[in-house]
Structures are given as structure tokens and as C-alpha cells.
Image (cartoon, rainbow, N blue to C red):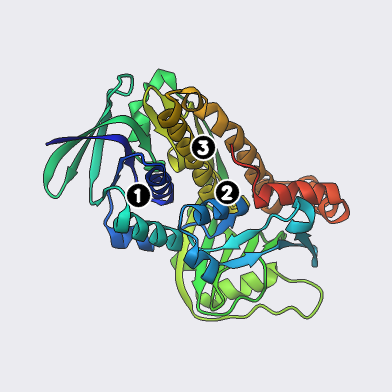
């Protein structure tokens, strides 16, 4: 059985769903194919920080109601090192830009609800196994859904199917180049049923390793510890985790880390990855299918959103004018922002983490950089502008 659509979107995560919503609002038909079932998609834990630009677009496309009601507005972050702290004030340094704490799971729920209510087809359990004809004017997606093999012909195919997805393989191997860095440490992340011990995120540099205090809601804390690659979460008792977090967050003053029941533990590897170009023929990549950043800079979800915002504008421009100029520029436009985000994420990661092989000299360079951010409005502004999000496009 074969159907046709203007835009075939592979992947029903935040990138694919946001793209579908933006296309729907432009009157461009599309179909979203997601390999997992709805319950899984709505429960997988991922990012929790939204840049100003991401929030603006979610609002404008009709997905901001619950975000505005339940999201936590943050005007800065706190850096800690050598038992001292420094707050970076985002609005004061960026002309008013800020960030929101609103979990990716909630963004996905909001977009799914909109899509199922009045959007284009969204098929769960649709297992895509091939994208063919990228260099033709009608590429084809082959997938299995409800026990039947099906094909979807498209004017354009958009791969929002993540690092392990199939879309990237539609590019000839000789036509793409990848850049990668694997970091020599991971994060042990926990969710805990306890009110956050801070009003804004805390990024802590420590001789014992990095730690991050975040939150999911006023009642749920999200915390991370730098751990060696290959760490088994089962080796870390709740008490050991809280003790280590307390040691790494130590600061002069009366601040206290609140403890509570740990409801989940997971180890997240740290890596950087970029594939170029992000378009081949009529197949285009967006989000994790094209690039991955370590989570230290809170860029992953926001980079995916930026990709599809640029892409939706380009497809709308094509519909309105018949011009492919913006589509032809898509890869270069996105990659400029991608590499800026890769650099910022690398900067945050290497400044705040303790590399197992680093020397005392390396540590002193880290401390010097943190001291510089605390002392220089220019250095602080560079951090704030990148963290709160650069202009899209």
C-alpha cells in the first residue's frame, strides 16, 4: 500500500512533532512516523531547559498554554568552585532573554495532543526500515505498521529519528562527513521526590568531579554527578549519591542540600557528534539525527527546535514563492548554529568537569576561567548569551 504526502517526517520526538505543528500551521501536509508507542514516547526522560527562542515558537504555534502555567522561569544559573559561588544573570547580560525549566516529556505530550486533535497523521508503532531515492524528486519511505508493509512517497523526507535512526543512511557514505568527540566520563542522573535546594540551576566544579543541581518541578529535583564511563548505577546507593552531591556542592555559607527518596537512576554517556551536510537531495536531517551535544550546555532539545524552525520557514517559503533558496541554504544555516552550540557545550563540559588525565596545570586553567566569568561582565555575557540561546536562522 502506497500513499503520498508533501513532507514525510521520520521520528515523533520533539523535533518531528514541532515540525509537524509548524507545517500544519502553514497549510503544508505531512505524515509523522514514530517507531515507538505513544506511552513510551511520552515517558522517556530527556532535556529540561528551554531557551527563549524555543519558548517563543512553542507559544506561537499553540503549544505554550501548559508551559506558561507550569514551566519554571529562570533568570540565571549559579556557578560553584573552590567553595565560592557566582550567579550569572541572564536578562541583565542578554537584553532580557531567559530560560524555562519544562521537561521534554511535557513538550512532547503537549505537541502530541495538538497533533492528534487537529494535525496531520501521526502513526505510532511505525517502524521505518529504509529511505530510498533521496536524489529523486519523490523519495520513498518504507515502513511496517500494524503488521503490514507500507510505503510513503514524499516531496521531501525529514529525518528526526535520532542518532540511531535510518534516515542518515539514505545519504551516500562518500557524501557525508562526521565529526565526533567521546568524553572520558559520564553523568549519573537521578530524579528525587524532594523540593529543589535552589531556585536556579547550580553547576559545580569540584576536585571530586562535576555536579549539577536541576529540577523538574517545585516538588521534584533532578541532579547529576560526574562518574567514570561504564559506571553501573546499581553500585551507587542513595546515601552514597547524596553524600557525594553534598561534597561537590560544598560552599561557604549556610546553604543546605535537601535529601529525599530517589525514584530513578541512570548513567548518561557524554559525546559530541556532527554530520555534514544536513541535506542530500530531498532528504534532510534535523536534531539528533544530525548532531549531538553533551548536556552540560542544555543545547540538545533547543538545537533540534532551531533546525525545524529553519526548515519550516524554508518549506513555507517554497510553498508561497516556488523558490528553493531557503531549502538550499538549510544545511549551511543550521550548521553555523550547530557548531556554535557544539563549542559552547564543549566549553561548559571541559571547564566544569575533571578529566581523569588532567594535570594540576589543567585544573588551574579551569579555575582561572571561572574566576574570569565572575570578574568580567564580558565573559559572563558570552556565557549568558549562549546559554539563553542565540537568534535562530
Residue 47 spot, x, y in % from top left: 51, 57
- Mark 3 secondary-structure assignment: helix
| Residue furthest right as drawn | 375
Q: Is residue 116 above or below residue 327?
A: below
Residue 180 spot, x, y in % from top left: 53, 35
Q: Nearer the viewer, mark 3 or mark 2?
A: 3
Where is the N terminus found, in terms of image quarters? top left
Residue 368 spot, x, y in % from top left: 83, 50
Residue bearing the label numbered 3: 310
Residue bearing the label numbered 2: 299
Q: Is residue 194 above or below residue 65?
A: below
Q: Residue at x 38, y 32 (%)?
A: 168
Compute the Cα span from label 2 to label 1. 19 Å
Disc on res. 259 = none
Q: Is residue 41 left or right of residue 102?
A: left
Q: Say few, some or many: other residues with alpha carbon within 10 Å of mark 3 (under 14 / 14 to 19 / 20 or more).
A: many
Residue 91 spot, x, y in % from top left: 74, 57
Amino acid at each position: 500500500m502506497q500513499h503520498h504526502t508533501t513532507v514525510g517526517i521520520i521520528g515523533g520526538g520533539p523535533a518531528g512533532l514541532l515540525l509537524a505543528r509548524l507545517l500544519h500551521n502553514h497549510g503544508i501536509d505531512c505524515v509523522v512516523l514514530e517507531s515507538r508507542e505513544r506511552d513510551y514516547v511520552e515517558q522517556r526522560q530527556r532535556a529540561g531547559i528551554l531557551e527563549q527562542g524555543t519558548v517563543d515558537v512553542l507559544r506561537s504555534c499553540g503549544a505554550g498554554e501548559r508551559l506558561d502555567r507550569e514551566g519554571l522561569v529562570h533568570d540565571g544559573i549559579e556557578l560553584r568552585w573552590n567553595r565560592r559561588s557566582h550567579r550569572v544573570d541572564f536578562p541583565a547580560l542578554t537584553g532580557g532573554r531567559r530560560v524555562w525549566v519544562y521537561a521534554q516529556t511535557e513538550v512532547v505530550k503537549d505537541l502530541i495532543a495538538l497533533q492528534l486533535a487537529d494535525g496531520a497523521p501521526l502513526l505510532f508503532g511505525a517502524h521505518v526500515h529504509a529511505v530510498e531515492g533521496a536524489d529523486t524528486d519523490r523519495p520513498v519511505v518504507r515502513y511496517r505498521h500494524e503488521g503490514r508493509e507500507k510505503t510513503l512517497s514524499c516531496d521531501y523526507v525529514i529525518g528526526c529519528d535520532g542518532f540511531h535512526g535510518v534516515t542518515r543512511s539514505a545519504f551516500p557514505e562518500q557524501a557525508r562527513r562526521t565529526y565526533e568527540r567521546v568524553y572520558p566520563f559520564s553523568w549519573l542522573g537521578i530524579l528525587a521526590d524532594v523540593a529543589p535546594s535552589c531556585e536556579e540551576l547550580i553547576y559545580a566544579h569540584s576536585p571530586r568531579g562535576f555536579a549539577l543541581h536541576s529540577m523538574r518541578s517545585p516538588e521534584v529535583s533532578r541532579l547529576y554527578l560526574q562518574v567514570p564511563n561504564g559506571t553501573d548505577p546499581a553500585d551507587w546507593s542513595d546515601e552514597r549519591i547524596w553524600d557525594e552531591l553534598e561534597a561537590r556542592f560544598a560552599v561557604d555559607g549556610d546553604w543546605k542540600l535537601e535529601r529525599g527518596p530517589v525514584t530513578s537512576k541512570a548513567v548518561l554517556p557524554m559525546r559530541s557528534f556532527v554530520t555534514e551536510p544536513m541535506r542530500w537531495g530531498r532528504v534532510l536531517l534535523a536534531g539528533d539525527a544530525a548532531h549531538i551535544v553533551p548536556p552540560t550546555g542544555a543545547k540538545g532539545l533547543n538545537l533540534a527546535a532551531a533546525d525545524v524552525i529553519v526548515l519550516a520557514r524554508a518549506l513555507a517559503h517554497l510553498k508561497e514563492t516556488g523558490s528553493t533558496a531557503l531549502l538550499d541554504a538549510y544545511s549551511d544555516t543550521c550548521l553555523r548554529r550547530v557548531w556554535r552550540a557544539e563549542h559552547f557545550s564543549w566549553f561548559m563540559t571541559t571547564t566544569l568537569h575533571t578529566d581523569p588525565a588532567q594535570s594540576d596545570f589543567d585544573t588551574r586553567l579551569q579555575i582561572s576561567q571561572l574566576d574570569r566569568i565572575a570578574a568580567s561582565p564580558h565573559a559572563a555575557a558570552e556565557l549568558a548569551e549562549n546559554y539563553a540561546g542565540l537568534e535562530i536562522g
